[in-house]
Image (spheres, rainbow, N blue to C red):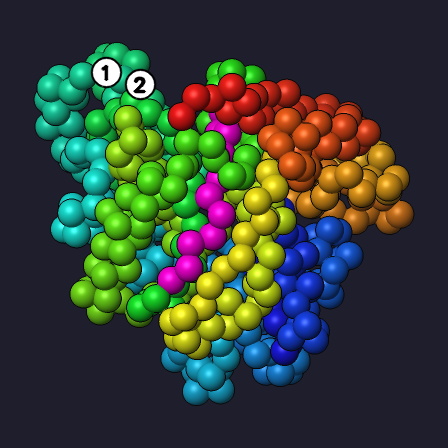
């Protein structure tokens, strides 16, 4: 098979690395890719939302399967574009259409979907700029901390937790009136704060049947001890100690099944990933959010634990033939650490030469995220630059391998959290 992966981050490098292992994989392309994907596939200089060029490339290279990595092309309707063109409509694709992608593209849409389908979630109300006074009145009835969420896509940074009603009022004004997140915060959800511990569950579905991939715990805040502003993710751990068999059974019965059934009932033909962001509140799973794709950096911790032919599962999801398919998961632990540019998630400089990339990193996997080839050097290009994934028979061993490799890589301003997975080392279920 000839396969095209769309995207240029750490998630896409991890997907390419995994797909390449399949005997069914003939030619593998990544558009636009990065220096890491270039090690396992052929990069193609086409932007992720240039649908016309991507379509022509698929025809030129006889692409059999397209795997869409990031959310933006899904929300903009890449599937709809392909399906509307008779020459492209026969190409298999992993990723939902525009309406299905609204599970991620609109927090308001996904909240209404959860409520309609009795999926456990926090209470919330949605407000627009003209509703500012009503929003203030509603905040006055809320018990802090208060969660404020931009309705649209905000690169994983559109959620603010306010510790007082006064702070929440100031934040919602900044979001709605001053457009803190641009059009993404044209609508804002005011949501009840759930006190628990988070995890991410990943589902691959063909719209009728599904397989559940390994779960992961993501670390969103920039600083050790979960301090500082939210980021796109500073690290991930898989498996998650508190995701017991009993808890995951509840997730499947109370969240996954009603989600797939709800999509079917709404007539949404959904072929792709559903990332379920969950809060474990005293053993009860509550959905915080859906994403319409795999997570980053969770994919870099999840892919090394999948023993099955992952391409085989992707093709089955795209064809609608997932029924009866199973997934084999490695019991080993994986720990992923994001290496980021100094200043991230705020302003940061690009173009820093990365040193230490080429020694033997057999003790951990190095996935490229925000990197670029500049002459003979690989340089920093994004906020999150690399993701280091260590694997071991215990969480501790996986952490040691990841941190040992992270310690060998250098660039000016490099930063990473030192405590990824530490909170789970002595966690009592």
Q: Is residue 303 above or below residue 283?
A: below
Magenta stretch holds residue 295: no
> Where is residue 113 drawn, in percent x and y?
20, 51
Please determine whether, in this image, residue 123 is positioned above or below residue 331. above
Residue 228 visible from this viewpoint: no
Quarter of the figure with residue 248: top left
| Residue at left offset 23%, top offset 19% | 169
Q: Which residues are magenta?
A: 210-221
User: In terms of secondary structure, where does tag 1 sit?
Assistant: loop
Disc number at residue 19? none
Residue labelled with disc 2: 162
For the residue pair 336 and 86, the one nearer the viewer reads as: 336
Q: Position of residue 245 (x, y in %)?
A: 38, 42
**Of residues 250 and 10, which is closer to you in this image?**
250
User: Callout 2: few (<14), some (14-19), or many (20+) C-alpha neighbours within 10 Å?
Assistant: some
Residue denoted by label 1: 144
Q: Is residue 10 visible?
A: yes
Mark closer to the observer (2, 1): 1
Picture quadrant where residue 95 is located: bottom left
Give whichever of 221, 194 is nearer the camera: 194
Q: Which quadrant is the N terminus positioned in?
A: bottom right
- For the image shown, how many numbered marks are present on the structure? 2
Per the model, the C-alpha gap separating discs 2 and 1 is 7 Å
């Amino acid at each position: 098979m000839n396969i095209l992966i769309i995207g240029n981050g750490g998630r896409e490098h991890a997907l390419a690395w995994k797909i390449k292992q399949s005997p069914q994989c003939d030619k593998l392309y990544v558009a636009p890719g990065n220096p890491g994907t270039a090690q396992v596939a052929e990069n193609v200089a086409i932007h992720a939302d240039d649908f016309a060029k991507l379509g022509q490339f698929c025809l030129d290279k006889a692409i059999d399967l397209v795997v869409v990595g990031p959310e933006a092309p899904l929300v903009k309707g890449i599937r709809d574009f392909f399906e509307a063109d008779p020459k492209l409509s026969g190409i298999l694709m992993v990723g939902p259409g525009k309406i299905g992608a609204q599970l991620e593209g609109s927090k308001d849409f996904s909240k209404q979907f959860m409520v309609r389908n009795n999926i456990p979630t926090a209470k919330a109300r949605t407000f627009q700029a003209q509703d500012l006074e009503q929003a203030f009145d509603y905040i006055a009835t809320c018990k802090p901390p208060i969660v404020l969420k931009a309705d649209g896509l905000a690169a994983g940074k559109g959620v603010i937790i306010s510790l007082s009603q006064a702070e929440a009022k100031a934040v919602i004004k900044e979001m709605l009136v001053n457009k803190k997140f641009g059009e993404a915060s044209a609508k804002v959800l005011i949501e009840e704060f759930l006190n628990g511990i988070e995890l991410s569950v990943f589902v691959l579905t063909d719209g009728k049947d599904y397989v559940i991939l390994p779960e992961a715990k993501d670390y969103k805040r920039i600083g050790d001890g979960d301090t500082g502003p939210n980021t796109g993710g500073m690290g991930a751990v898989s498996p998650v100690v508190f995701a017991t068999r009993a808890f995951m059974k509840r997730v499947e019965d109370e969240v996954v099944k009603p989600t797939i059934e709800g999509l079917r009932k709404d007539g949404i033909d959904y072929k792709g990933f559903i990332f379920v962001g969950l809060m474990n509140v005293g053993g009860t799973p509550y959905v915080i959010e859906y994403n319409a794709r795999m997570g980053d950096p969770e994919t870099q911790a999840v892919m090394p634990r999948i023993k099955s032919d992952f391409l085989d599962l992707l093709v089955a999801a795209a064809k609608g033939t997932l029924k009866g398919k199973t997934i084999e998961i490695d019991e080993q632990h994986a720990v992923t650490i994001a290496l980021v540019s100094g200043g991230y998630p705020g302003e940061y400089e690009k173009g820093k030469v990365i040193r230490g990339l080429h020694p033997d990193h057999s003790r951990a996997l190095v996935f490229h995220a925000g990197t670029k080839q500049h002459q003979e050097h690989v340089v920093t290009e994004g906020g999150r630059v690399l993701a280091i994934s260590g694997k071991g028979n215990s969480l501790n061993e996986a952490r040691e391998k990841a941190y040992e490799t992270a310690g060998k890589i250098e660039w000016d301003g490099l930063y990473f959290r030192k405590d990824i997975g530490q909170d789970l080392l002595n966690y009592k279920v």
